[in-house]
């Protein structure tokens, strides 16, 4: 039973309710950090950690959190975990911490986390909330990695900093700059919606 | 170590070349959600500009006179977000009192300014780039205006897009992102004007 439930969480987080291309949440960082795969991977892991832990914490405190100060409590919980990630990165991966710049701190305002806390963790026990957080984080990280693969491959001719394209390849610089981030995400959303249309032809909301 | 750029330069750079939305991708959620009509876009843009300018000033003071002397720099995330949240609450009350219609239009996105990454982003950039007080306020104000400019432009384009034949699956967020991408491209034309780190 527990196993099946875990799987549903992941199916939801990664595809059916994927935070990035279904709910269009947390796309700021999705656009900003996806020009290098290493940064993207670290960012994804950081986000999985923060989403999972803050969902679990919000859920653990759900009975003693006053309704009115709920948002504030959630933001503080999230901010504390982000602080841990930030300190960890500064200590062990200073280069990447430098490269990510403010975007680590901006995990706080990543709507995915707030969305999961508000939409799920607030009304559910700790373990499911934790799983739900992990699943959403994984969904986010996967989409980012796909986008980053394309952008880094075409923009630098590298993957994780290693050269993979033939030496004659001229880097397509626009791919690592801002506009390509928008275009890539738009394409991704387009494809994802198109696939969904094929499955459910007539019934479609305006979401 | 102070940043050598002058305040007016930072102000213009943050509107055009380093637009917080189109170059740094901050504040996307509300950018996509509120940009259907020009009036609400203007309303939200002004609210964001106001909050951004005031919170950069407040957060500058908090950071340099509270966090740095007591060596609490790592707590800046928490401190910044609390200042922003308190300020947004204030703006919410003011708008509710003086412009109830705008209050209804903005709906849930008004309190969500708290988690608008553009605002926290500006505060964090201010610290990373080591701006002084005047530079920070110029950056906050310019950043807000840049955001306002981008969201109003997108709202204008989207009003026209309503009549355009767009593939069904591309409607909504998809096409908005493509438009935003084109806007980012055109804003890149400004980049020869000012260079900023």
Image (spheres, helix red, strand yellow):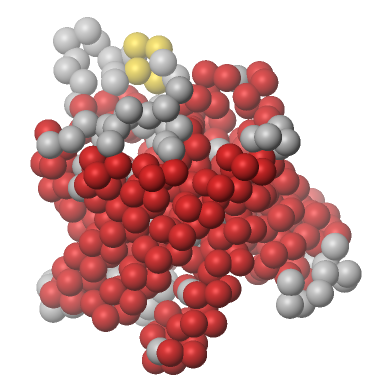
Residue A117 falls left or right of residue B102: right
Residue B134: image quadrant is: top left
User: Is there any visible trace of residue B160 in the rendered image?
Assistant: yes
Residue A176 falls left or right of residue A103: left
Residue A50: image quadrant is: top right
- Picture residue at 56% right of the left edge, 60% below the top: B84
Residue B10: image quadrant is: top left
Residue A147 lies, with reference to residue A152, above or below; the image says below
Residue B99 falls left or right of residue B190: right
**Percent from the top left, x then y, of residue B161?**
16, 72
Q: How many marks?
A: 0
Q: Quadrant of the C terminus of chain B?
A: top left
Residue A142 lies, with reference to residue B162, above or below; the image says above
Residue B126 lies, with reference to residue B93, above or below; the image says above
**Percent from the top left, x then y, of residue A189?**
35, 55
- Picture residue at 60% right of the left edge, 58% below the top: B83
- Picture residue at 80% right of the left edge, 55% below the top: A57
Q: Quadrant of the N terminus of chain B?
A: top left
- Work out which residue is located at the far top of the displayed protein and give it: A167
Residue A176 lies, with reference to residue A179, above or below; the image says above
- Picture residue at 16% right of the left edge, 68% below the top: B157
User: Is there any visible trace of residue A142 in the rendered image?
Assistant: no
**Percent from the top left, x then y, of residue A39?**
48, 28
**Percent from the top left, x then y, of residue B73?**
65, 36
């Amino acid at each position: 039973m527990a196993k099946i439930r875990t799987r549903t969480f992941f199916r939801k987080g990664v595809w059916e309710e994927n935070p990035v291309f279904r709910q269009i949440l947390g796309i700021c960082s999705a656009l900003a950090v996806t020009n290098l795969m290493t940064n993207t991977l670290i960012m994804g892991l950081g986000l999985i950690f923060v989403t999972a832990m803050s969902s679990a914490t919000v859920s653990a405190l759900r009975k003693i959190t006053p309704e009115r100060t709920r948002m504030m409590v959630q933001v503080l919980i999230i901010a504390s975990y982000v602080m841990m990630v930030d300190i960890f990165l500064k200590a062990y991966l200073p280069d990447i911490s430098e490269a990510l710049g403010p975007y680590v701190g901006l995990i706080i305002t990543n709507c995915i986390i707030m969305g999961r806390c508000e939409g799920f963790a607030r009304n559910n026990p700790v373990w499911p909330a934790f799983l739900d957080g992990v699943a959403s984080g994984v969904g986010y990280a996967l989409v980012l990695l796909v986008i980053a693969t394309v952008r880094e491959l075409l923009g630098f001719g590298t993957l994780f900093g290693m050269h993979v394209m033939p030496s004659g390849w001229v880097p397509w610089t626009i791919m690592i700059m801002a506009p390509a981030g928008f275009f890539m995400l738009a394409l991704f959303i387009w494809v994802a919606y198109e696939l969904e249309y094929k499955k459910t032809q007539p019934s479609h909301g305006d979401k | 170590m102070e940043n050598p750029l002058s305040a007016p330069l930072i102000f213009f750079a943050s509107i055009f070349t380093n637009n917080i939305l189109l170059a740094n991708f901050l504040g996307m959620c509300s950018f996509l959600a509120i940009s259907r009509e020009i009036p609400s876009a203007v309303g939200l843009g002004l609210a964001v500009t106001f909050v951004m300018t005031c919170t950069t000033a407040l957060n500058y003071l908090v950071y340099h006179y509270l966090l740095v002397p007591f060596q609490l720099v790592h707590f800046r995330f928490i401190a910044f977000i609390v200042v922003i949240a308190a300020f947004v609450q204030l703006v919410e009350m003011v708008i509710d009192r003086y412009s109830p219609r705008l209050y209804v239009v903005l709906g849930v996105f008004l309190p969500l300014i708290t988690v608008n990454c553009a605002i926290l982003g500006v505060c964090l950039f201010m610290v990373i780039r080591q701006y002084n007080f005047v530079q920070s306020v110029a950056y906050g104000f310019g950043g807000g205006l840049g955001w306002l400019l981008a969201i109003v432009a997108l709202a204008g384009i989207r009003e026209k897009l309503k009549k355009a034949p767009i593939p069904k699956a591309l409607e909504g967020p998809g096409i908005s992102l493509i438009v935003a991408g084109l806007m980012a491209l055109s804003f890149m034309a400004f980049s020869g004007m000012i260079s900023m780190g």
